[in-house]
Image (tube, rainbow, N blue to C red):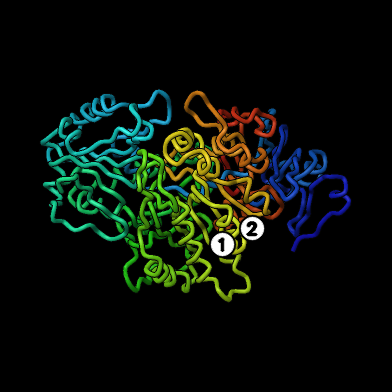
Amino acid sequence: MRYINRIALAAMCLVAQSVIAGGNADTIFYGGPILTVNPKNEQAQALAVQNGKIVAVGKKDVVTKEWQSSSTKVVDLQGQTLMPGFVEPHVHIIGTAMTEVLGLNLSNFNLPYDSLGTLSAKMKAALSSIPPGGWLFGFGVDPSRTDPFMTELNADVLDKVSTTVPIFIINQSGHIGYVNHKALELAGVTESTPNPGGGGVYVKDAAGKLTGVLIEPPTYAPFMAKMPKPPIADLVNAIKKTVNNIASSGVTTSAEITVGFDLGLDQEVKLYQSLFANDAMPIRVRGYLYGPAIPAGYTGLKPNEGNDRLRFIGVKFISDGSTQGLTAALNDPYVYPKNTANRGNLDYQTEDLYQQMKIYFDQGWQLAVHANGDRAIDQTLSNYERLLAGNPNPKERRLRIEHFTVNTPDEVSRAVKIGAIPGFTIGHVDYWGEAFHNHLIGPERANRIDPSASFQKLGARYAYHSDSPVSNVGPLNYISEGAGRLWQKPARQVLGPNQRVSVDQAIRAVTINPAYEMFSDDKIGSLEVGKQADLVVLEKNPRATAVDEIRNIKVKETWIDGKKQAW
C-alpha cells in the first residue's frame, strides 16, 4: 500500500512515500532532466531507487533529504537525460540473429539504394566464406528500395552469382524469398509441387516454369529443411550479440514476436529459458508463440508463464504479406504496375483463422495478428469482434494488430471500440514513404498509413516498433518518425501531415504504451513510485531537441531493476 504526500504533490514535487523506510536508497539520480512519462508527463529533478524499485521521484532537495544515506550511490547525470527504458514490442530476436549475424546482411537503410550489380557483388564476395555443402543465405533485398525501382531477384539472376552453391535470399519484408535453381533442386521443389497453406506461392512464369520467387514464409520450409543448421554455440553468440544491440538502443524490454518460427517451438522455448536464466541478459523479453508452430494439443507453456525477465504471454498469427512487397491484402488494387488488378492475398480464410485463434484465446493467451492491408485489418477486426462478443470488458484482453499499415477510418474506430492496440512499424513512413506515396498505393492511402494521430484523437493507445530485421531497432528513431513523418528519399516530404503527433505523444509510443500492450505497464514504462527501476540515460533531452535530430541522440546507459547493464 502506498501513502501519498499531498503537500509534496501540491508543490509539484512528485514524491510519494511507501511502506519502505526512507533514508536508505541504493541509488539516487540527479543533475539532469528526468522525464517521468507519468500521466501528466511531468519532469523531475531526482529519482531514488531501493531494492530495484523506484521509491521517490521529485525535487532534488526533497528526494536527497528523505532518501540519501552514507551508503547511497549518487549518480550525477551531468546534464544528461534520464527517462524510462524503451519498450520494443515487436522484434524477431532469433530471426534477426540468424539473418543479420549468421547470414549475409543485405539490408540497406541508407542512400544510395543498391542495384542488381551491387547486390550481386556482395553475394559473390560472400561465396568465399561458404564451406563445402553450405548455402549462401542472406536477408534484406528490397525491390522498392533498389535502383531501378522494383528490380527483383529471381533464379536466373542468382544463377549468375552461382550455379553450384545453393542460394536462398529473403526480402527485407520477410514475406518474399528468392532462390537459385540449385536451391530448387536440393529442396525438391518443382513445377508440380503444390503451394503450401498460409498464403504460400511458388511463383511461376507465363509458361508455368518456376521463377525462383517465393511468396510467404510457408514456402521457405523446404529450403530451410535442407540448409545446414548453425552450431548451437554460434547461434547462442548471435542471439547474445543481437540482444546487446537491442539494449544499446536504450531498450530495456523487448518482445520476441514469433517464438518457434525458426527452430521449432520446444527448442526455442528451451533456448530462451537457458539464455535468460539468472537474469543473464541485458533486457527483459515478452514472448509470443508463433501460432502455426504450436503442435495440436500443446501443453508445454501456460499463458503468462515465466518471470519478470522472461515471460510468455501471447500467440501470434500472420494474416497477409508486405505492402512494399505488393502482397499485403488491400481492398482496392495497388497502383503499381499501372492498371494492375493485384490487391494482395489473405493468408487464411476468415473462418479458418478464427478457429485457430479461438483455441488460444479461450486458453487465456493474448493474441497478436500481423495485418498490413486494410482487407487483412478488416478480417482481423471481424475475428476479434467475434471472439469478444458478450465480453463486458473487451479492452482487458488487449488484443494486438501488428502494423495496421494501410487502413480506413472505420477500421480505426472499430479497433478503438474493442480496445485493440495497433503496433506501427513506423519506419514505413521513413524508408518506404516515398515508394508508397508515389508508386505503390498512391497519395490518399499512403498518407493514412500508421495513423497515430487518428488513434490519439480518440484517446486510444498505439505503439511503435521495428519488426526487426525488417527495420533496425531504434526507439529514438521512431520518435523522429512518428512526430515528423518525413520520408527518407530526396526531396524529403512529410507523409500524411495530419497523422503527426507531438514528441511527448511519440515518447509514450515507445515507453508506457508498449508496456501496456504487453501487460507490463504496472511495472515499467514510466518513472513512478513502486515501478521497477528500468531506466535509460540519454546524451540529450528529446523534448528539447529538433524533431528530426532526436534520432541522432546517443544512448549512454541502460538500467534494469536499478542495476546498470553491460552491452
Residue shown at 17%/50% (left/top)? 226
Q: Is residue 6 left or right of residue 451?
A: right
Classify 10 Å Cα crowding around label 1: few (below 14), some (14-19), many (20 and above): some
In this rendered view, identify the residue nearer to me: 542 or 280: 542
Q: Nearer the viewer, mark 2 or mark 1?
A: 1
User: Disc 2 versus disc 1: distance between alpha carbons?
Assistant: 14 Å
| Residue at position x 46%, y 73% in the image | 363
> Looking at the picture, does residue 412 appear above or below residue 12?
below
Sooner in the amino-acid sequence: mark 2 or mark 1: 1
Number of other residues with Cα within 10 Å of mark 2, as a class: few under 14, some 14 to 19, many 20 or more: some
Q: Is residue 295 above or below residue 549?
A: below
Q: Is residue 378 left or right of residue 16?
A: left
Left or right of residue 423: residue 140? left
**Residue 476, quarter of picture:** top right
At mark 1, the secondary structure is: loop
Query: What residue is rendered at 78% in x and 43% in y?
Result: 58
Q: State whether residue 52 is above or below residue 295.
A: above
Instruction: Point out residue 556 in the picture as x, y percentages from the top left corner.
Output: 57, 32
- Residue at image mark 2: 522
Q: Amino acid at mark 1?
A: Arg
Q: Looking at the image, can residue 100 be seen?
A: yes
Does any portion of residue 95 appear in the rendered image? no
Instruction: Kindly indicate the quadrant of the structure image that contains residue 252.
Output: top right
Q: Is residue 345 left or right of residue 554?
A: left
Q: Identify the residue position indicated by label 1 in the image.
A: 398
What residue is shown at x 32% (from left), y 35% (from top)?
Answer: 141
